[in-house]
Amino acid sequence: MAQGSDSNDTSYTKSPSPGTKQGSTDDVRKVMRREKNRIAAQKSRMRQTQKADSLHLESESLEKENAALRKEVKRLTEEAKYLSTVLSNHEPLCTGLSPAPSDLLYSTHGPFHQHINMPHYPL
């Protein structure tokens, strides 16, 4: 029976006897194909592992950055509350404030009392 002549032929047909040249060539090709496939699978697994490691390192870095940013937000929020309290306590005592707060910027009344009256410009 010739190879490939059967209508139910599959890729799993028996190779000719080991003594023939055709069988030897097919075996070499099969071994080479399996070796190439094994190397390709190994490379693929290595790339997948490297990608997972890279993503893990990036995740850790982003978590550290996120924690630092949250800490900075907390510090800035506390500073804003403190400055708002200082301003609220200062407003009743400040003689540089005019009835219209939008007219007021800075002038020099000491290191923390800097007010300048800003002129009105028509819009």
Image: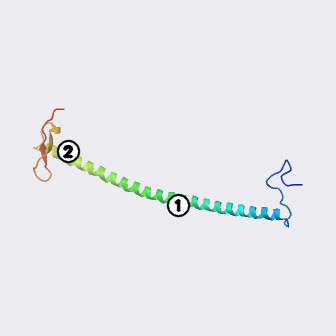
Element assignment for label 2: helix
Tell me the crowding category of disc 2: few under 14, some 14 to 19, or many 20 or more residues within 10 angstroms, Cα based.
few
Q: CA distance from mark 1 to mark 2?
A: 52 Å
Q: Residues within 10 Å of mark 1 (few under 14, many from 20)?
A: few
Identify which residue is drawn at 51% across, 59% down: 54
- Total labels: the figure holds 2
User: In the picture provided, is 92 more to the left or to the right than 5?
Assistant: left
Q: Are marks 1 and 2 in contact (CB under 8 Å)?
A: no
Q: Name, please, the residue furthest toward the right.
A: 1
Residue 83's place in the image compared with 18, above or below, is above
- The amino acid at mark 2 is Ser
Q: Quadrant of residue 34?
A: bottom right
Q: Residue 75 or 2: which is nearer the viewer?
A: 2
Which image quadrant: the N terminus? Answer: bottom right
Q: Residue at x 54, y 58 (%)?
A: 51
Residue drawn 74% across the image and 64% down it: 31
Disc 1 target residue: 53
Please tell me whether mark 1 sits on a helix, a strand or a loop.
helix
Report the mark closest to the observer, 1 or 2. Answer: 1
Amino acid, disc 1: Asp
Sequence order check, earlier mark of 1 and 2: 1
Q: Residue furthest bottom?
A: 19
Image quarter (top left, top right, bottom left or bottom right) of the C terminus: top left
- Tell me where residue 46 appears, x and y as whole percent: 59, 62
The answer to which quarter of the image holds residue 37 is: bottom right
Residue under circle 2?
88
- Asked if residue 23 lies left or right of residue 114, the reply is right
- On the image, the x and y values in percent for residue 50 come to 55, 61
Residue 121 marker: none
Percent x, y of residue 86? 20, 48
